[in-house]
Image (cartoon, rainbow, N blue to C red):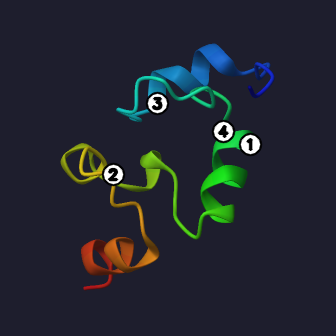
Amino acid sequence: MAAKCDKFSSNMKRCNCSYDPCDKKGNCCACIQYHLSMKELPACAFPDEVEKTFDRSFAKFCKIYGK
């Protein structure tokens, strides 16, 4: 489990992660580190409707924003 971040409250106002059991919500440093290690981006890099598909790949990001 990731340690709680000092900016947890303000981070949670912007966090759109829909994965309920996630222990990294509100801890952006841990979240980004985790997702990059999985060769993907965190939820906040995607619009809500795309984030909910859990396809957080670089390919999906490029498909959305690479126009």
The amino acid beneath tag 4 is Cys
> Which residue in the structure is indicated by mark 3?
14
**Depth check, front residue: 55 or 44:** 55
Tag 3 secondary structure: helix
In the rendered image of this protein, does residue 42 appear above or below residue 64? above
Q: CA distance from mark 1 to mark 3?
A: 14 Å
| Residue shown at the point (45%, 46%) measured from the top left | 44
> Which residue in the structure is indicated by mark 4?
28
Residue 5: image location, x then y, percent: 77, 23
The mark that comes first in sequence, 1 or 3, is: 3
> Which residue in the structure is indicated by mark 2?
54
The reply to whether discs 2 and 3 touch (Cβ–Cβ < 8 Å) is no
Badge nearest the viewer, 1 or 3 = 1
The mark that comes first in sequence, 3 or 4, is: 3
The amino acid beneath tag 3 is Arg
In the rendered image of this protein, does residue 13 appear above or below residue 37? above
Q: CA distance from mark 1 to mark 4?
A: 4 Å
Badge nearest the viewer, 3 or 4 = 4
The amino acid beneath tag 2 is Phe
In the rendered image of this protein, does residue 32 appear above or below residue 58? above
The mark that comes first in sequence, 1 or 2, is: 1
